[in-house]
Image: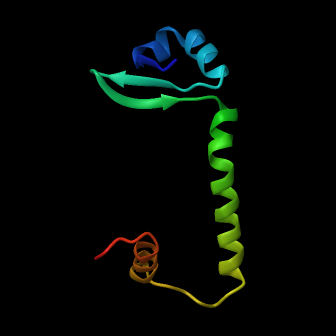
């Protein structure tokens, strides 16, 4: 079940939030009624980011092995064409 709590609970009810994220589900925190942040366990965060970290490491190795460099315009143009975005 989605948990949405006020950000003050992070300070006042930390053990409850810690238990909630320990089960693998994130807790959404609000400030003045608007979304402010998401709290999740380190394990869940790693699960979400490990693949990205591996791809970034792979890109760093490829860049180190090559003298070819692209401008940001070239990179974003290739990305846009790859996903079918015009302009």
Which one is nearer the viewer's eye here, 2 or 30? 2
Which one is nearer the viewer's eye here, 85 or 20? 85
Which one is nearer the viewer's eye here, 39 or 12? 39
x 56%, y 15%: residue: 17
- Where residue 72 appears, x then y in whole percent? 42, 78
Q: Quadrant of residue 43?
A: top right
Outermost residue toward the bottom in this view: 67
Horizontal side of 20 relative to 73 (left or right) equals: right
82 up-or-down from 39: above or below: below
- Where residue 87 appears, x then y in whole percent? 28, 76
Outermost residue toward the front in this view: 84
73 up-or-down from 16: above or below: below
9 up-or-down from 32: above or below: above
Horizontal side of 43 relative to 87 (left or right) equals: right
Q: Quadrant of residue 61?
A: bottom right
x 55%, y 86%: residue: 69
- Where residue 82 appears, x then y in whole percent? 46, 74
How many discs mark residues in the rendered view?
0
- What colour scheme has been applied to the protein in the rendered image? rainbow
x 65%, y 79%: residue: 63
- Where residue 60 appears, x then y in whole percent? 66, 72
Horizontal side of 66 relative to 75 (left or right) equals: right
Q: Quadrant of residue 74?
A: bottom left
x 63%, y 14%: residue: 19
């Amino acid at each position: 079940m989605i948990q949405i709590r006020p950000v003050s609970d992070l300070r006042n009810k930390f053990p409850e939030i810690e238990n909630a994220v320990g089960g693998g589900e994130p807790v959404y925190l609000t400030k003045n009624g608007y979304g402010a942040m998401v709290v999740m366990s380190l394990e869940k965060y790693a699960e979400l980011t490990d693949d990205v970290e591996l791809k970034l490491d792979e890109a760093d190795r490829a860049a180190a092995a090559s003298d070819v460099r692209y401008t940001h315009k070239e990179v974003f143009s290739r990305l846009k064409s790859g996903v079918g975005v015009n302009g």
